[in-house]
Amino acid sequence: MVGKWIRMLYVIVAWLFPAAILIQVFFVGLSLFTTQPYWDMHIALGHSLVLLPVLLVILAYLGRLSSPAKRLNWLVLGICLIQTEGFAMIRTAVPTLAALHPVLALVLFALALTIALRARTVVRAPVATHPTHEKNTTSGTIDEKRELGI
């Protein structure tokens, strides 16, 4: 029962992350197309956004998600750290490389959306348990397992 609640929380966080990225882009748009700068809000939200991929990784393990799902969450966390902390450090030293910041944001958004779209099937998937005795615990067809990312 706890596994189902953790997986439902995973789905919520998975959808919050791409939504938060869209808010980030909105702040950049406000800064570029209005007379008021919103860069401070963009920076503050950007640094706090890292918490969502961290939470996704934790929930992926607590919810006993499949290995490919866990790897995708780790990839997003790594990219997010590079995006927020890495580019912040090289912005003035290597501006040409730092110009990849918006490109990496697009990659991050695509991956976050992929996680969010796949998250719906996570709640319906059976929670993996460790068998206490020798018993055939495999169930479902290959197509069902493939759909669930098992």
Image (cartoon, rainbow, N blue to C red):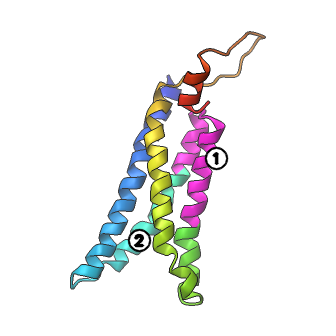
Placement of 149 over or under 45, stated as above or below: above
Residue shown at 76% from the left, 11% from the top? 133
- The residue lying at 59 percent from left, 34 percent from top is 65
Q: Residue at x 43, y 34 (%)?
A: 120
Mark 2 lies on a secondary structure that is helix
Residue pushed farthest right? 134
Q: Which mark is residue 44?
A: 2
Q: Which residue is mark 1?
A: 71
Q: Which residues are magenta?
A: 55-81
Prevalent SS, magenta region: helix
Q: Is residue 72 magenta?
A: yes
Q: Give the crowd class for mark 2: few <14, some 14-19, many >=20 residues within 10 Å.
A: few
The residue positioned 72% from the left and 11% from the top of the image is: 136
| Residue 67: quadrant of the picture | top right
Position of 107 compared to 12: left or right? right
Neighbourhood count class around disc 1 (C-alpha, 10 Å): few under 14, some 14–19, many 20 upward: few
- Image disc number at residue 55: none
Which residue is at the front of the view, 106 or 49?
106
Looking at the picture, which amino acid does disc 1 mark?
Arg
Q: Is residue 39 within the magenta segment?
A: no
Q: Give the left or right position of residue 39, taking residue 140 as reference.
A: left
Task: Provide residue 88's location: percent of width, then percent of height.
Answer: 53, 78
Which part of the image, by quadrant, shows the C terminus?
Answer: top right
From this viewpoint, which residue is outermost toward the left?
A: 35
Percent x, y of residue 105: 47, 66
Pointer 2 or 1: first along the chain:
2
Secondary structure beneath label 1: helix
Q: Report the label total.
A: 2
Front of the two marks 2 and 1 = 1
Foreground of the two, 124 or 48: 124
Nearest the viewer among 70 and 50 is 70
Q: Nearer the viewer, residue 1 or 32?
A: 32
